[in-house]
Image (cartoon, rainbow, N blue to C red):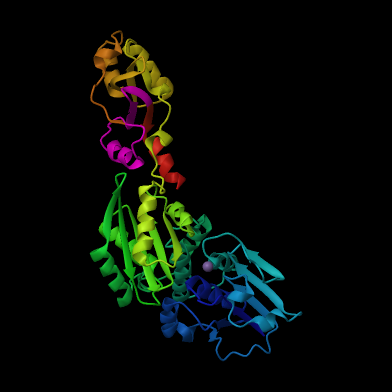
């Protein structure tokens, strides 16, 4: 007998991959782990009868000669399959997108770095022209969407997106998908959310607004990260930190930030945890949540979150510089040669003002290219100190009609921030 199985705590990608296998391997039977996600449980309560899937609970492994493992690569993650791992003549096939920590040796392996495991199986179904119903298409789409945050996670590949298109063409029901991907939280989490709104403090750190909250909570809350994200969005703050304690031994710190504003991962690493710039978490042992929150506050105050300063992202002023004594013709030439939208008019290193490409073009039309730049320099232009934050630059750029900001230290032009400089910073994250 051939069976298909997947990891415990089964999510939609795992379930969809199992079901896809029942199409590709017509003799196979899916064996669903006992522990599945609440959303998957809800889905199975209505759809179980149309899927060739049986619960692990009363399934006998005796006659199994062939095993297909999907969305998992490790015996530990399967539901009581150890007996099979000891079978020498077991035929094993793997379909998976987890590259690390492989302990299941398979005769046939399909392991590739895509956003969802089911993408690999769908590509095979598309190649073979395997027919499937709109209900199945809906489940497959749930698989891709749930593992990729609806194609928003950086792990997404063009192959996942192509399969989304393929499934929509084949009748996937987007209303059903939305219903099952509903990210609402239960009453217990809603209560934490309410308390966060009520009890959090808002810190202003280097013009970045950060919500911080320390709470005692009940045991068994598993979606606190979602609550912190929702809190950050709802409050409209740049970053949010929740410090939660369910038992007296440890506090859990969860942080979320808008891109580029707070390096959450850096703070979490100092606290002994991990993460990246936008999201992270850490466990602090032996402290009450208020003391743990104080540690977060202190790290923020020390600048541990590394707000990006303008001086680290600005460009050299050289290609924007024109001498006050130069003619408008020279200015026009510099604009064209360097392909910039405006210039900084300087006397020595001192910044006198700005000159836009439009003003230069107008001077050309008026036949005034021979006059010195100085007379055309606009005195009031957007300026920042080198120590100003990335955020200040973002705000000021909205008002900078030439798309450039002068960076000035004691009247001297030391750099220029262009829109490209800001964009490069955003896309680095
Ligand atoms: Mn997966």
Task: Give the x, y percent position of residue 314.
Answer: 40, 32
State whether residue 12 is above or below residue 271: below
Q: Looking at the figure, which quarter contains the N terminus?
A: bottom right
Q: Nearer the viewer, residue 231 or 411?
A: 411
| Left or right, residue 219 beside residue 96 | left
The answer, for residue 26, to whether it is visible in the render is no
The answer, for residue 357, to whether it is visible in the render is yes
Magenta segment boundaries in residue numbering: 385-414
Task: Give the x, y percent position of residue 263.
Answer: 42, 50
Magenta region includes residue 384? no
Residue shown at 46%/45% (left/top)? 428
In this view, the residue farthest toward the top is: 370
Which quarter of the picture shows residue 178?
bottom left
State whether residue 135 is above or below residue 320: below
Q: How many labels sit on residues?
A: 0
Task: Give the x, y percent position of residue 252.
Answer: 41, 66
Q: Nearer the viewer, residue 141 or 12?
A: 12
Which quarter of the picture shows residue 32?
bottom right
Task: Give the x, y percent position of residue 171.
Answer: 43, 70
Which quarter of the picture shows residue 310?
top left
| Left or right, residue 126 beside residue 308 | right
């Amino acid at each position: 007998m051939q069976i298909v199985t997947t990891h415990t705590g089964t999510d939609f990608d795992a379930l969809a991959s199992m079901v896809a296998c029942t199409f590709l391997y017509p003799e196979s039977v899916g064996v669903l782990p006992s522990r599945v996600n609440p959303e998957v449980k809800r889905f199975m309560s209505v759809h179980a009868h149309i899927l060739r899937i049986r619960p692990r609970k009363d399934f006998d492994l005796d006659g199994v000669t062939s095993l297909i493992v999907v969305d998992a690569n490790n015996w530990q993650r399967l539901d009581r399959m150890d007996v099979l791992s000891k079978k020498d003549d077991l035929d094993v096939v793997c379909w998976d997108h987890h590259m690390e920590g492989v302990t299941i040796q398979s005769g046939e392996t399909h392991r590739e770095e895509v956003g969802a495991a089911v993408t690999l199986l769908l590509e095979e179904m598309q190649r073979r022209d395997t027919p499937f119903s709109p209900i199945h298409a809906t489940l497959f789409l749930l698989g891709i969407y749930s593992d990729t945050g609806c194609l928003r996670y950086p792990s997404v590949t063009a192959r996942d997106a192509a399969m989304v298109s393929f499934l929509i063409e084949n009748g996937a029901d987007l209303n059903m998908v939305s219903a099952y991907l509903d990210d609402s939280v239960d009453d217990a989490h809603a209560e934490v959310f309410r308390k966060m709104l009520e009890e959090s403090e808002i810190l202003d750190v280097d013009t970045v607004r950060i919500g911080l909250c320390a709470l005692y909570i009940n045991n068994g809350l598993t979606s606190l990260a979602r609550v912190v994200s929702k809190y950050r969005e709802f409050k409209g703050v740049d970053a949010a930190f929740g410090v939660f304690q369910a038992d007296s031994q440890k506090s859990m710190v969860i942080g979320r930030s808008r891109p580029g504003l707070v390096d959450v991962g850096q703070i979490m690493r100092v606290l002994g945890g991990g993460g990246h710039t936008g999201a992270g978490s850490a466990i602090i042992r032996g402290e009450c949540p208020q003391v743990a929150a104080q540690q977060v506050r202190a790290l923020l105050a020390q600048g541990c979150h590394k707000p990006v300063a303008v001086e680290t992202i600005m460009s050299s002023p050289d290609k924007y510089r024109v001498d006050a004594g130069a003619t408008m013709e020279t200015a026009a030439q510099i604009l064209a040669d360097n392909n910039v939208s405006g210039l900084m008019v300087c006397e020595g290193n001192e910044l006198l003002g700005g000159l836009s490409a439009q003003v230069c073009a107008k001077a050309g039309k008026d036949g005034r290219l021979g006059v010195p730049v100085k007379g055309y320099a606009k005195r009031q232009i957007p300026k920042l100190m080198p120590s100003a934050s990335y955020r200040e630059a973002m705000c000021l750029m909205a008002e900078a009609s030439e798309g450039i900001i002068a960076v000035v230290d004691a009247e001297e032009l030391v750099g220029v921030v262009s829109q490209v400089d800001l964009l490069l910073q955003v896309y680095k994250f």
